[in-house]
Amino acid sequence: MLKDISIVIPAYNEEKYILNSLRSLLNQNLANTISYEIIIVDNDSTDNTYKIVKSFIDKYRKSNDKISFELIREYRKGVAFARQTGFSMANSKIIATLDADCIASPLWIRTIFNIFNYDYDYLYNPFYRNLPSKIMDSIKNTINKKIVATTGMIKFYDADTPELKFINNLIPLFLKLANFFYLFPSLHGSNLAVLKEAFIQVDGFNLNLKTGEDLDLGLKLEKIGRIVYLPAIVYASSRRFKKNIIKAILIYTVANFLFHKITGKPLINELDTPRGEKDKLLEYFKLDNFNLLNKDNLLKDNNLIENLLTNLYFNNKGNSEVKFNIKEIINEFFEKLKLKK
């Protein structure tokens, strides 16, 4: 029987986190008419992820059969392969996904259902309020396009350091910056949903990408329909950012995002920066070495990001109004950083 929503969770060595994610999906505040399935794709884990999930599913099925589960293995390494395999198995018109260390808020599934079934578009959300009028008019002109995808806010549930706490507070500001460039909410795999027919139409994820497959999907989907904001939070683990939070945020997130938008491919196609791409990043950031890329320098000098935005993206554009608004957003970003210093 066709479900209302399929939820795909890619998992690689997530034995410590994935059960909390599954429990959050079982404890949703739903209308009784919403049916859904959960598809877990084990991406050739070397820990007990597969075994733990299988045991969890077996116990659930003994007492309840309301929610369908599928547990499969994908031996090709990479989240793009894992998501693609899960999406291809989806038995529904709507496919949602989040990471295995994420916790969905109680209204997450219900909100996704409402967006696609009732054409719900939170158009005048905070991402758009300060955009120039010409850009806002352009956004309004897309209102007649069919909604093909939605994506929403993430926050760290384990922000246990001052750095992580101010990053938590700054996530909305970064998303405003990101959406300034995309002019609609850019997709990120921790909190997104798509129409299956649209996903198939754009040939799904780019399997050549080891990172940024979600952003790439958004670039393709914007050509055939409308991507809207999903006003339901997903809480994520901050563990990937704890080793070097400034480098992780500034390079892996900001630089990769902008470069992907400009060129159609990520600047970094690895989780760790390959040697050849380090030279590119140093050149873009005008640094002698990565040791200069630390919190103190970031707090003192906003040129690291501002130069990247204006030189890399708007070189030869000649749009003073857009440049001015970017400068305002960057200044706001650094003012909040200084407040949390």
Image: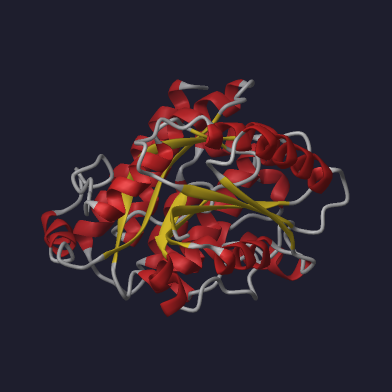
Q: Left or right of 46: which side holds 285?
A: left
Query: Residue, x 62% and y 25% (percent of image)?
Result: 158
Query: Residue, x 61% and y 36% (percent of image)?
Result: 21
Quick check: 246 above or below 169?
below
Who is closer to the viewer here, 119 or 150? 119
Tell me residue 239's x, y (percent).
Answer: 69, 36
Figure quadrant of residue 286: bottom right
Quick check: 31 above or below 41?
above
Query: Residue, x 24% and y 42% (percent of image)?
Result: 125
Who is closer to the viewer here, 36 or 317? 36
Q: Left or right of 294: which side holds 135?
A: left
Tell me residue 103's x, y (percent).
Answer: 56, 34
Tell me residue 238's x, y (percent).
Answer: 63, 35
Colour mode?
secondary structure
Who is closer to the viewer here, 157 or 264? 157
Figure quadrant of residue 206: bottom right
Quick check: 13 above or below 333?
below
| Residue 176 can be seen, yes or no | no
Number of callouts? 0
Tell me residue 128's x, y (percent).
Answer: 23, 47
Who is closer to the viewer here, 29 or 60? 60
